[in-house]
Image: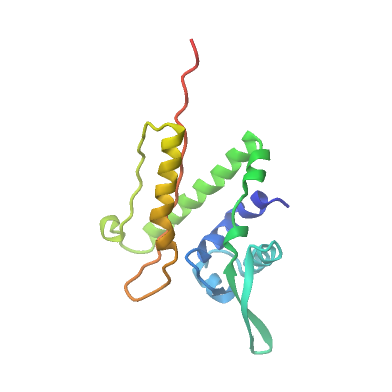
Amino acid sequence: MTSSEILLHPVRLRIVQAFLGDRALTTTQLAAELDDVPAGSLYRHVALLADAGILRVAAERRVRGSIERTYILAQAAASIGPAELATMTPEQHSRAFLAFTAGLLADFDRYLAAGTPDLVRDGVGYHVNAMWLTDAEFLEFARDLTTVFLPRLANGPAEGRKRRVIANVILPAPEKPAG
């Protein structure tokens, strides 16, 4: 199974997203967060992600005669590499992007259903912007984003911090046909 086939399944994508932000979770904690996923299904998906090296066992402890594992995300394994991206067909890219956007939509729906949403207070936003950039300017922009993101990705849980999920999509605008 390819990385894209493993990662872009709707339930496995939610599992991976639950671990973002350097979180360590047991399957019991994960089940509490993904309470709409049947336990048997959740355990199968966690096992598949662990077998693929996407989740790693960070700790084990004995609980009432069984072993409880705490998992962490192997960040490098939790992405589709450039070589695999280059071999994907347009249809596979379309399915991958559909899984990505469906996951965002489901996360947003869960946010709205979780209580009284206050997008301003919670810092929720969704925007589309356009920029005119040469390839060199775009590379500089991508480096600037990395400069902004990297130090904050190293933040761990702490008093006053909320876990926030930030999703990026960068697309070239369609070009006009010649003529």
Q: Residue at x 36, y 67 (%)?
A: 162
Q: Give the image location of residue 95, x and y in percent.
A: 60, 42
Q: What colour scheme was applied to this rendering of the protein?
A: rainbow
Can residue 174 be seen in this snapshot?
Answer: yes
Q: Residue furthest top?
A: 179
Can residue 109 be seen in this snapshot?
Answer: no
Q: Nearer the viewer, residue 103 or 40?
A: 103
Q: Residue furthest right?
A: 1
Q: Residue at x 50, y 16 (%)?
A: 177
65 versus 115 height, above or below: below
Query: Which of the 4 image quarters holds residue 148?
Result: bottom left
Q: Give the image location of residue 88, x and y in percent.
A: 66, 39
176 versus 122 height, above or below: above
Q: Residue at x 63, y 70 (%)?
A: 56
Q: Nearer the viewer, residue 148 or 168?
A: 148
Q: Residue furthest left?
A: 120
Q: Give the image location of residue 93, x and y in percent.
A: 60, 39
Q: Residue at x 47, y 65 (%)?
A: 21
Quick check: 147 left or right of 69? Answer: left
98 versus 56 height, above or below: above
Q: Residue furthest bottom?
A: 64
93 versus 58 height, above or below: above
